Amino acid sequence: MLFLTGYRHEQLAYGTGGPRTLDNLYTEAMIREAFADFEILELNSVDKELHEGSGHQGMSAVVELVARKPL
């Protein structure tokens, strides 16, 4: 099983933590391509409050993945 949470491109507008360049941010399409060999169980783009220390505080644009590697 794979569980992934990453910041989306829209995170730059929030400025509440995470990477500061587009090269280090994700889209659903990028995730689907990167994990094309996996069975994607859930893939969601959401905006939500994060409170994970001084580097990640406030409203955030994230993509969340739950996937299973085929046997």
Image: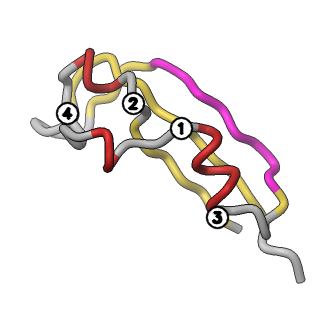
Marks 2 and 3, how far apart at CA:
22 Å
Give the labeled residue for mark 3.
2
Residue type at numbered disc 2: His
Q: Secondary structure at mark 2?
A: loop
Residue closer to the observer: 44 or 30: 30
Residue type at numbered disc 3: Leu
Asked if residue 53 is positioned above or below residue 49 in the image, the reply reads below
Give the number of the mark in front: 4 or 2. Answer: 2
Give the labeled residue for mark 2.
9
Q: Which badge, 3 or 1, is on the more N-terminal residue?
A: 3
Task: Please say whether residue 35 is one of the residues in the magenta stretch.
Answer: no
Give the labeled residue for mark 1.
27
Q: Which residues are magenta?
A: 40-47
Q: Secondary structure at mark 4?
A: loop
Give the number of the mark in front: 3 or 1. Answer: 1
Q: Secondary structure at mark 3?
A: strand
